[in-house]
Each structure stands twice: as structure tokens, then as C-alpha cells.
């Protein structure tokens, strides 16, 4: 396969460009760390203020663990999807960014273990080692799903380091299925929980592909900066896929919201408030994505770098969305409709 000649003049290799890129990456990491810390610390109390609802003890810890779980899932899914897109770019360079799969899998497994211990204690944060009884996990559906997620993250890490990293898709699918089933238990006030699980399955899969895929694409573009034509082609391919993902996320999110949250409770419940915050963040992400795509079309061929600024901001905003989504799973469950919307 022939590889296009590196274009030094079009790539941001100058010292000033490198310093700006390093400063941006450091700022982005700082923002994500602050979001990961502030959302679990301040999110529950802010969402519950004035609603009359009571949060379970340890809701902040649960939010933090779920943030790590969802973040690890996005990184793993994105690495697989981004690599698949990169291989389909004509005359693509062989260079690839360093893999984050092993670190993400370890972080996801550790967070899943923490959540499993809470599930084993009846969905309460244990007060001490004496209350930790992992054997209880086999006695409930939530416990078995928690064990499935732990094993799936470990398997995904091994698969990603093997000669066939694409096999990690199977354990990652198991994580998404487990999350979809956990969010809509068969025993509970919800009617037709299978419909809710399918909607969550579509929503979580597309969200992980969108957020994780963009992160991997931008990391690959940084490695490909001597080959701006290939970098532009990669971002263009991702943009076309992302448009479909956004449509699926929007449709599944609207259907899920209408099924579980009465419209009059949007601003009077913690779930509704967090959902509104998430929708506003998604709107910001969509605007940044649109700006990035417009810039990609307007810039001259072989110079995709003007589209990187809004795309990088989009990644940071998606990281905050992940944290808010984790909070959404930790606040008190919303009021269910008496009948299905389409029943």
C-alpha cells in the first residue's frame, strides 16, 4: 500500500503549535478531572435540593464509580471503532496512537468491583469490611450482572492486547447488555422492561461509539499530522458516522424519557433536573460538532487542523456528559407511567 508523502508545511509541527497542543491537552485533562470530581460531589445535592426526595447513602461514590465505568467503556469501544475507521482510509499511514485499552479495562474492572460490592450489600455502601459479602452476588439478578461486567472488562483487556484486538467487541457488548438489563429490572414498577432495555442498549452503544470514537480519531489525527490528507479523510469518515449515531441517540433518549418521566415532573424531581442538564450539554456538543464539520468542509484540501479546535472541545464536553449520565443512574428513580406510552 502506498502512503501519501508527509506534508510538513501543512502540519502543526512548529514549536508554537506543539506548545499550544500540549497546553490544550493539559487543560482538557484538568477539565475532565474537575468534572469527574465535582459532579459526584455537588451533583446529587444540587439535583435533590427542594424536591423532597432522599438519596441513598453513598450516591456520590456510586456516581464516581459509574463515571469511571462509562468512561472506560467509551475508551475501549472508541479504540476498536477508531481503529476500524483508520484502516479504511485510502493510503492510510501505518502509525497508530498508543493503546489505552489495558488501562481502561483495568479502570473499568476496578469500578465494576466497587459497584458489585455495593450491590452485594443490598445497594448500600458498606460501612466496614465485615459487611462485604461477595457471595450474595450470586443470589440476585443485579449481583450476577455486576459479576458479568467485571469479567467482561477483564476479558476486553486481554482481547485488546491479543493478536486479534477486534475480539474485544464481544465482552464490550456484554457490558452494554448488562447495563441495559440492570437499568430496567424485570421485577419492578416498570411495564415492558424489555422495551426499556432495548432503548438503553441502543442509546449506550451509540453514545460509546460517538464519544470514544471521536477521542480515538483525534488521537490518530495527532499521530498522522505529517499526513494531513489522511487525517482529513479520517475525520470526514467519522463525521458521517457520527451524524447517524447522534440521530439514534436522540431518538432512543426521547423514547426513554417519555416512557419513564411525566413531563410535569421534569423540574420537580432530581432525575428530571439531571436529565435537563444532560440535554443542554448534548446541545452544546451538537453545536460544536456542527462547527467542526462546517470548518472541515470549508478548509482547503490537506489542512484539517481548523476543525480540530471545536472537535477537541467536543471531546471535553462529551466527557462531562459521561459524568452527568453517571449521576442520572444514581439519583432516585423517576415516577413511572401507569401504562406504556404506546399501549
Image (cartoon, rainbow, N blue to C red):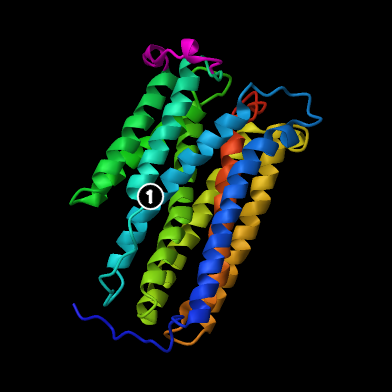
Report the residue at 58% width, 34% height from top.
63
Left or right of 238? Residue 322 is right
Q: Is residue 107 visible?
A: yes
On the image, the x and y values in percent for residue 217 come to: 41, 64
Q: What residue is shown with label 1? A: 77
Which residues are drawn in magenta?
A: 126-140
In the image, 258 versus 84, the foreground residue is 84
- Image position of 240 with respect to 12: above or below: above
Q: For residue 146, what is the image quadrant?
A: top left
In the picture shown, does residue 282 fall above or below 332? below
- Residue drawn at the location 43% of the way across and 86% of the way down: 10
83 left or right of 334 in image: left
Tell me where residue 77 appears, x and y as whole percent: 38, 49
Query: Based on the displayed image, in which of its 4 quarters is residue 139 positioned?
Result: top left
Reply yes or no: does residue 42 show up in magenta.
no
Q: Residues within 10 Å of mark 1 (few under 14, many from 20)?
A: many
Residue 15 x/y as whole percent = 48, 80
Quadrant into which the C terminus falls: top right
Residue reaching furthest to the bottom: 9
Please state which of residues 73 and 65 is positioned toward the viewer in this rendering: 65
Overall secondary structure of the magenta stretch?
helix
**Image quadrant in which the N terminus is located:** bottom left
Between residue 329 and residue 61, name the one nearer to us. Answer: 61
Depth check, front residue: 146 or 68: 68
Above or below, comparing residue 243 to residue 222 in the picture: above
Kind of element beneath mark 1: helix
Q: Is residue 186 visible?
A: no
For the point 52% across and 15% down, the residue is 128
Amino acid at each position: 500500500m502506498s502512503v501519501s508523502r508527509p506534508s510538513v508545511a501543512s502540519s502543526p509541527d512548529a514549536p508554537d503549535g506543539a506548545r499550544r497542543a500540549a497546553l490544550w491537552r493539559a487543560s482538557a485533562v484538568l477539565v475532565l478531572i474537575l468534572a469527574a470530581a465535582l459532579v459526584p460531589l455537588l451533583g446529587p445535592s444540587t439535583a435533590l435540593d427542594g424536591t423532597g426526595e432522599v438519596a441513598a447513602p453513598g450516591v456520590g461514590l456510586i456516581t464516581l464509580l459509574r463515571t469511571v465505568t462509562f468512561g472506560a467503556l467509551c475508551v475501549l469501544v472508541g479504540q476498536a471503532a477508531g481503529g476500524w475507521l483508520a484502516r479504511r482510509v485510502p493510503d492510510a499511514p501505518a502509525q497508530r496512537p498508543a493503546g489505552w485499552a489495558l488501562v481502561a479495562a483495568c479502570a473499568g474492572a476496578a469500578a465494576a468491583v466497587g459497584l458489585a460490592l455495593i450491590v452485594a450489600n443490598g445497594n448500600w455502601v458498606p460501612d466496614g469490611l465485615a459487611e462485604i459479602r461477595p457471595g450474595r452476588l450470586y443470589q440476585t439478578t443485579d449481583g450476577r450482572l455486576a459479576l458479568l461486567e467485571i469479567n467482561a472488562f477483564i476479558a476486553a483487556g486481554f482481547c485488546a492486547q491479543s493478536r486479534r484486538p477486534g475480539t474485544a467487541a464481544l465482552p464490550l457488548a456484554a457490558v452494554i447488555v448488562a447495563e441495559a438489563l440492570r437499568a430496567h429490572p424485570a421485577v419492578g414498577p416498570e411495564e415492558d422492561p424489555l422495551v426499556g432495555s432495548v432503548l438503553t442498549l441502543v442509546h449506550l452503544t451509540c453514545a460509546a461509539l460517538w464519544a470514544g470514537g471521536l477521542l480515538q480519531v483525534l488521537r490518530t489525527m495527532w499521530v498522522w499530522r505529517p499526513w494531513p490528507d489522511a487525517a482529513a479523510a479520517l475525520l470526514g469518515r467519522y463525521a458521517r458516522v457520527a451524524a447517524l449515531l447522534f440521530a439514534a441517540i436522540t431518538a432512543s433518549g426521547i423514547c426513554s424519557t417519555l416512557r419513564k418521566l411525566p413531563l410535569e415532573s421534569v423540574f420537580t424531581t432530581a432525575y428530571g433536573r439531571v436529565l435537563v442538564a444532560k440535554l443542554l450539554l448534548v446541545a452544546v456538543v451538537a453545536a460544536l460538532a456542527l462547527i467542526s464539520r462546517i470548518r472541515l468542509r470549508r478548509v482547503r484540501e490537506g489542512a484539517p487542523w481548523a476543525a480540530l479546535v471545536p472537535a477537541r472541545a467536543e471531546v471535553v464536553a462529551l466527557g462531562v456528559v459521561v459524568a452527568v449520565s453517571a449521576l442520572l443512574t444514581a439519583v432516585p428513580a423517576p415516577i413511572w407511567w401507569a401504562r406504556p406510552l404506546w399501549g
